[in-house]
Each structure stands twice: as C-alpha cells, then as structure tokens.
C-alpha cells in the first residue's frame, strides 16, 4: 500500500508541492524497495547484492537532490532546502512513512542535529573542517552528553570536565549512549569548563567541544547492547586526558546548555513528526489487514473490537499530528514561545505512537512481531522515545511549571496562542 498524501487545502502551494514530490519518491522509489534497501534485514547477503543495494541508495539520493528535496534541515548555503520548522514538519511526516527514507533525503540523526548546531554556532574554520564533510557524507559524527554516573534528565549533574591548558582543552569524563559512536569521525562533547587546579562545581559553565575520535584518550569502551541485541552503535566512551585545541569549543563557553536546548528543541519536533508518519504507516497496515483477514467466520473489519482499535488509533494520530504541527508553528516564532508545547508533544506523541503500533501488532497477530513487517521495530523505537531526549516525567514537570507560573502572574493559560 502506498501513502495517500494529497494537497492540504489550507497550506500554501510551496509546502504542498514539497509534500507531493516527497510522497512521489517515497511511494515510487522507497516503499517498493524497502526490503532491499536496509541490509541488516538480510544477513548473509552476497557482495553483489550489497553492491546493488548501495547503488539503489545512491540512485534514490541523486533523484532526491535533483528534485531539490535534499537536507530539509540545512540552510541553502550548505546545500539544504532551508525550510522553516512548519514546512519541515509537514515534509517529515511524509518522509517517515517509509522505513529509513529520511536518510535518503539527507536527514540522519545524530549527524543532522550536529549539522544544525555547527551551522548555527560554528566558526568559519569549524564549518570548513567539520560541517562540510558531514554534509557531503565523507564524515560521520556523534553527540556525547549523557553520563552513566549522572542523571541525563538533569544536565546540571554532568561531570565531564574540560580544563584549559595553554592553547588546549584537556577533557576527562565518562559518557554513554553516544549514538553513531562506532562510525563517528568526531563527537560534539558536552563538558564543564573548569579552571585549572579548581574542583568542578555545578556552577561551572557548560561548553560543547568538537573532539575527533582519533585523538589519544578517546576510548570507545563498547557499543551498548539494547533491546536484546548484543551490540548497537550507542557507545560507552571514556575521555581520558583528551587534548584538543582551544578553538574546538563550539560557540562561547557558557553557551553549551543553550546550544543543547536548541538542538533538542528542534529535534523533538522532527522526532514527533517522524512518529506521526510512522503511525500513519502502522494505521494503513492495520486497516489493510483488518479488511482482508478472516477469523471466526468473518472479516476482522466487521468485529467491534477491531473497529475500536481503528477508531482509537485514528484519534491518537489526529491528536498527535495536530499538537505537533501547532508546536512547529510556534517554534517559528522562537524556541521559548514553544517550550510548553514541545514538552507536551514529547510526552504525548511517543505514547500515542506506542498505542497505535501496539494495536496494529495485535491485529496482525504473530506476523505483527515478525521481521517481515516494520511494526516490531517501530514499537521498540516508540518505547525508546519516551526516554531519549528527556524522559516523560521531566517534560510533565516543565509543562506544570510553565502553567503554574502563568497563573501565579494572575493570568490563565491562553490555549489559543
Ligand atoms: C537509544 C538511545 C539513544 C540515545 N542517544 C543519545 C546520544 O546520542 N547522545 C546522548 O548524549 N544521549 C543519548 N541518549 C541518552 C538519553 O538522552 C538519556 O537516556 C535521557 O536523557 C535520560 O537520562 P538517563 O538515562 O540518565 O535517565 P535518568 O536521568 O537517570 O532518569 C531515569 C528515570 O527517572 C525518572 N525521572 C527523571 N527525572 C525525574 C523527576 N524529576 N521526577 C520523577 N521522575 C524522574 C524518569 O522516569 C527517567 O526515565 C540515548 C538514549 C537512548 C535510549
């Protein structure tokens, strides 16, 4: 089944055109090849097959570039589409319908987040050295913030230190869940800038530092096994007396926390719109199965349990989608204005995504948990999203704090704005 994506009457022609052309590539080039495109789904494949797959990926990427749909998150001067949030959000739901399609459109986390941060905070030299190779695909990167000994949901607890020593930083710390760690050529590492000889404190300013993975002292301990797999590319990393030039600081010392917020704020909208695209796909799969599977003398679609699944999933998707588009509209007015709504979608959308996929799995029965369908991978992805980029509880606290703050000023909440 292909994605049914028609022009939206209330949207301007430019965004509709982007969505239509994206859907065309997703429907004609990605979906029919989904099984072949992602090699890990076919262990033991021949070299020739592997070559064919790589060629196919390259061909689709070329088509995307020709259509002017490459790297929606990047400014035009770096070969991207320079899309504002709302347009990007509308494009993302279409992209995410097919498994892995985003990477064929030049959007691959964590590289895409690092690209945006380098484009915003990087010096001319940093852009030349790190951003351009990241964009042309000759380099890979990771973002290294979370630490096993400290709560990732409380960034103030972070203890990795960067001490100035002449014209170098000396970095020491222990991180984990640094995604893409196996392939990465460099990490953007979140540190505390500490004066030489001083004990680190929670008041020391945060700084993000670009660290090439080949520098002595960057020790990848392991790719952490997750969800029953032995290994993943989410790495545990020890930074042991790592020396990098002072000019590797990304932005000013003290801007590290803000840069991370910029990155995560934007990332949360993209993740949520991805989730919406994947829910849409799961919904199509569920309804398709309900229309064709006979059980106990009738089609699943005629059983009221299943009709309930369809109705509840419809409600979940509409709510998740409209909330995310609302947050994307707001973020175009500035990150601060959208903070409550970003937290709201960060809580609501992954849970709605889990519910929708869970129902689709149930309708498919055993096939639902098999690797023949994308549903089981979607389910694990949805569960993970409730932790990554800030767990549910932290966002609930933030929503309540903002709401209560508003009432404390003597004003009610204005849901119209
Ligand atoms: C697949 C995956 C990929 C990731 N990729 C990256 C990456 O590339 N780079 C990176 O730096 N990090 C990455 N992370 C880490 C992620 O950002 C952290 O896991 C997340 O911020 C939560 O931090 P934590 O795991 O330390 O949990 P903790 O902070 O220890 O929190 C544990 C639990 O405590 C509860 N909790 C927390 N605060 C409160 C509170 N105030 N009140 C009540 N309950 C609370 C929540 O239920 C939370 O889940 C990744 C994580 C996963 C799972």
Image (cartoon, grey):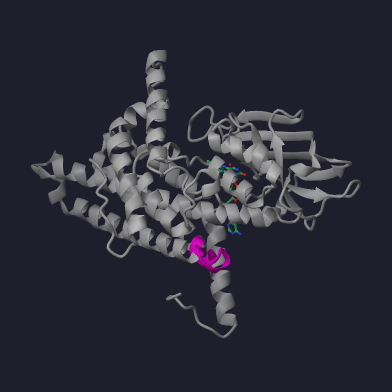
Q: Is residue 94 above or below residue 9?
A: above
As for residue 334 lying within the magenta part, the answer is: yes
Q: Provide residue 367's location: percent of width, then percent of height.
A: 27, 34
- Is residue 390 visible in the rendered structure shown here? no
Q: Nearer the viewer, residue 313 or 266?
A: 266
Q: Nearer the viewer, residue 381 or 280?
A: 280
As for residue 62 lying within the magenta part, the answer is: no
Q: Is residue 127 above or below residue 230?
A: below
Q: Nearer the viewer, residue 260 or 200?
A: 260
Q: Nearer the viewer, residue 181 or 47?
A: 47
Q: Provide residue 29's location: percent of width, then percent of height.
A: 31, 34
For this orientation, the residue located farthest to the right is: 197
- Which quadrant of the structure image shows residue 380? top left
For this orientation, the residue located farthest to the bottom is: 410
The magenta region covers 331-342
Q: Provide residue 15's location: percent of width, then percent of height.
A: 36, 56
183 to the left or right of 310:
right
For this orientation, the residue located farthest to the left is: 297
Secondary structure that dominates the magenta span: helix
8 to the left or right of 271:
left
Image mark count: 0
Q: Provide residue 266's location: percent of width, then percent of height.
A: 53, 54
Which residue sits at x=51%, y=56%? 392
- Is residue 162 visible in the rendered structure shown here? yes
* The N terminus, quarter of image: top left
Which residue sits at x=50%, y=53%? 268
- Which quadrant of the structure image shows residue 405? bottom right
């Amino acid at each position: 089944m292909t994605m049914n994506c028609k022009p939206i009457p209330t949207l301007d022609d430019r965004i509709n055109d982007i969505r239509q052309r994206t859907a065309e590539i997703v429907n004609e080039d990605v979906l029919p090849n989904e099984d072949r495109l992602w090699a890990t789904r076919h262990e033991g494949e021949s070299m020739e097959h592997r070559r064919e797959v790589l060629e196919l990926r390259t061909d689709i990427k070329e088509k995307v570039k020709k259509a002017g749909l490459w790297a929606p998150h990047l400014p035009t001067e770096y070969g991207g589409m320079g899309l504002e949030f709302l347009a990007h959000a509308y494009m993302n739901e279409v992209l995410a319908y097919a498994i892995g399609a985003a990477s064929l459109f030049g959007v691959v986390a964590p590289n895409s987040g690092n690209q945006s941060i380098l484009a915003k905070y990087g010096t001319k030299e940093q852009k030349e050295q790190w951003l351009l190779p990241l964009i042309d695909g000759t380099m890979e990167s990771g973002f290294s913030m979370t630490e096993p000994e400290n709560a990732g949901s409380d960034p103030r607890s972070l203890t990795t230190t960067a001490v100035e020593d002449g014209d170098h930083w000396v970095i020491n710390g222990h991180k984990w869940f640094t995604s893409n760690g196996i392939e990465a050529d460099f990490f953007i590492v979140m540190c505390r800038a500490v004066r030489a000889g001083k004990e680190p404190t929670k008041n020391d300013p945060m700084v993000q530092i670009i660290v090439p993975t080949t520098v002595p002292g960057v020790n990848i301990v392991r790719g952490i096994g997750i969800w029953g797999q032995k290994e993943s590319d989410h790495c545990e990393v020890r930074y042991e007396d790592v020396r990098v030039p002072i000019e590797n600081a990304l932005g000013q010392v003290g801007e590290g926390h803000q840069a991370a917020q910029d990155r995560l704020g934007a990332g949360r909208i993209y993740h949520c719109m991805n989730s919406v695209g994947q829910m849409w796909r799961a919904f199509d799969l569920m309804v398709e199965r309900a229309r064709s599977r006979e059980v106990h003398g009738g089609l699943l679609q005629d059983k009221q349990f299943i009709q309930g699944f369809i109705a509840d999933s419809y409600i979940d998707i509409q709510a998740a989608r409209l909330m995310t588009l609302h947050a994307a509209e707001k973020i175009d007015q500035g990150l601060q204005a959208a903070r409550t709504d970003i937290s709201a979608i960060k809580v609501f959308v992954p849970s709605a995504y889990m519910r929708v996929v869970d129902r689709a799995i149930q309708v498919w029965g055993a096939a639902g948990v098999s690797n023949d369908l994308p549903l089981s991978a979607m389910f694990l992805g949805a569960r993970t999203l409730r932790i990554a980029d800030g767990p549910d509880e932290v966002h609930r606290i933030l929503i309540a704090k903002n709401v209560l703050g508003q009432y404390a000023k003597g004003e009610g909440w204005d849901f119209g704005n």
